Image (cartoon, helix red, strand yellow):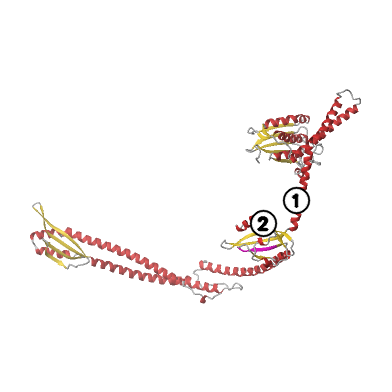
Amino acid sequence: MNNAGNIKTSSIAKRMVLYIALCSIVITVLITSFQVWRDYKVITVEIGRELKQIDELYIKSITEGLWLTDTRRLKTLIEGMATLRDVNFVAIYENKILLVSTGEKLKKQLITQTYPLQYRFRGRDLLLGTLEVAIDIKGAEQRVFDRGLELLVNNAIETLVIVSFLYLILHNLLFRHLSTIVSHLTSMKPDSINPPLKLARKKINNSGKDELDLVVGAINDISKRVMLAFSEILSAEKAKQLSEEKFRDYALSSSDWFWEMDKDLKIVFLSEKYEIVTGYKSEDFVRKSRQEFAAEETDTEKWKSHIHILNQHLPFRDFNYAIFKANGDKIVVRVNGTPVFDGDGSFAGYRGTSTDITEQKHIEILRDDALIQAEKANRAKSEFLATMSHEFRTPLNAILGFSDMLRAEYFGPIGSDTYKDYANDIHTSGEHMLTLVNDVLDISAIEAGKRQIEYEYIDVADLIFDSVRKIQKIADDGDITIKILIAPDVPELFADKRSVMQIMLNVLSNAVKYTPENGTIEISAEFDEKNLQLSVKDNGRGIPSDKIKHITEPFFQVVNGAHAAHPGTGLGLAIVKSLTDVHNGQLQIISDLGKGTTVIVTLPIHPGQK
C-alpha cells in the first residue's frame, strides 16, 4: 500500500475553517446590510421629523415677519432653522426675489422643500412669498456609511477570533487524530498481523467512549476481519483450483460435452468430449453455426422454431438433430442451452451441453413400434368382440329360452326331478354367461368407439329413482336401507340416458352386493355450476387402499378383501369408468377399510365441458 506521505491530500481542517470563515463573512455582510438599512430608515424618519418641525414651529412666525417686513426677525428665524442637523440652506423669497437667506446651497445631494407663506387679512389668504429649505442628503449617507464600516470591522474581528479558536479546538480533538488514522490505514497489510491502532488522547474524568473511540475499535475489528477474509480468499482460490480440476475430470468422464456460442450464434468453444465422441477436432467447427453441424435439412419447422428461440435469446432444452462423425456415421444429439448476458444486460451468447442419444432414439423407435402394434392388436380385439355381439348373444338366448321351457315343463312333465334341477342349473349358468358376455361386449364396444351415444335431456331425479326401483328387491332381501338426497337446484343433464342409467345400476349393484345386512346406502346428487356430481356411499367393509388404483381395470377383483366371496365379471367399474370418460367426466373412489366405500361420478351438465 502507499504511504500517507505519497498521497496527495487536501486538509479537511483548512477546508472546514475556510467554509466557516466564508459562512461567517456572508452572515456578517447580511447582518451589517440589515443594520445599515435600518439606520438609513431611521435617518429618513429624522429628516421627515425636521421638516415637520419647520412647518409647525417656523412657518407662522416667518409669515408674520414677512407681513411686517421685519428683516431682522426673519434673519433670526432662518438662522434658527439652519441649526437643525441636516438643514444646509434656508431662504425666503418675496415675489420670487430673494429676501433673506442663510447657509450654502449645494448643487447635488440635496432634498429641497418649499413652503408657501400665506397671511390671512380681512378674510382673505394673501400669498406673501415662499420659504425654501434644502436638506443635505450627503451627510446622512456619510453617517450610514460610517456606521456600516464600523460594523464590518467589528464583525470581521469577531469572525477571525472565532475561526482561530475553532481551528485550534478541531485540530486538538479531531484533525490530528484523523492523520494518525490515515497513516495507520495506508500501512495495513492484509497478509500479515497489523498492530492495533492507538490514538494519543487524554480523557477527562475517565469519560466513556466517544465517536473516535468507536472508529478506532471498528478499524481494529476490520483489520482482523480483513486478515481472516484474506486467508479465506486464499483457501477459496485453492478450492476453486481443485473444483476446476474436478470439473475437468467430470467433463472428460461425462457423456455430455460442453459448448459456447458468441453473440453472433457462432461456436467459440467445444470441450474435449466432443472430439472423443465425433472424432473431429473442436477447432474445425469454431466460428461455425449449429446449422453447419447438421447432417439433416435445416429448412424445416423444427429448425425454424429453434433459430427463432436463439434470435430471441431464450433458454432451450432437448433440441434433437443429427450430425456426422469423422468416420461418416450419423448420430443423433440432444442440445440444451442457456443465454448469457453481460453486466449491463447485453446479450453475450449461449452456454450449454450436448449428448449423444443415438442408442436412446433407437430404443424409443422400437418402443413406439411396439406400442403401435399393441394398440392395433387391442383395437382389433375390441372390434372383433363388438362385431361378434349378435353371434355371442343368439346361442345364449337360445340356451336360456330352452332351459326355461324345460324347467317350466311347458310341454308336460320331463319325468325325473334331476332333469328339472339340471334345467335350473343350465338356466342359471346361461344367465351368468349372458351377463359376462354383455359386459365384455359393452366395454369392447366402448373401447372400439362403436357404442352409440345419443344425447338428450335427462331428469336426474327420475333416473335415480328408476335405478333404485330396479335394484330395490335385492336391497330388500338383504334388509338394506337406501336413502336418496337430491339437491333442489340440480338441472337436467344433457347426456346419453342409457349410459348414465348403466353407470348408476353398476355402481348401485356393487354397493348392494358388498353392503352387509341391515346396512345403509346413501345416494346424493349435487350441482356446482357446471358439473353434476352423483355419489353412492355404502357402509360395507371397504376396499384395501393398495387395490383402489386397480379397481377400475377390466376383470380386476379384490380377492383378499370384503368382495372376495361375491361372484362377478370384474367389469362393472371398468364400464363405469369408460362411460364416464366418454362423457368427459371423472370417476373417484374413496374407501376406508372396515367402514365403507363412496363412488363419486362427476359429469358435465352439457357435452364438451370438463
Tell which of 80 and 593 is nearer to you. 593
Secondary structure of the residue carrying tag 2 is strand
Is residue 151 positioned above or below 483 on the image? below
- State the residue position of label 1: 368
Mark 2: amino acid: Arg
Q: Residue at x 74, y 56 (%)?
A: 360
Which secondary structure, mark 1?
A: helix
What residue do we see at 62% from left, 56% from top?
308
Q: Quadrant of the C terminus?
A: top right
**Side (left or right) of 465 relative to 416:** left
On screen, residue 13 versus residue 319, left or right, reads: left
Per the image, the residue denoted by label 2 is: 317
- Figure disc tally: 2
Task: Give amino acid for label 1.
Answer: Asp
Q: Position of residue 325 (x, y in %)?
A: 73, 63
Please provide percent x and percent y for residue 531. Answer: 65, 38
Dot placed on the residue nearer the N-terminal end, 2 or 1: 2
Instruction: Tell me the distance, in whole angstroms, between the alpha carbons under discs 2 and 1.
Output: 22 Å
Give the quadrant of residue 376.
Answer: top right
What secondary structure do most residues of the magenta stretch adopt?
strand
Q: What residue span does the magenta drawing correspond to?
A: 257-263
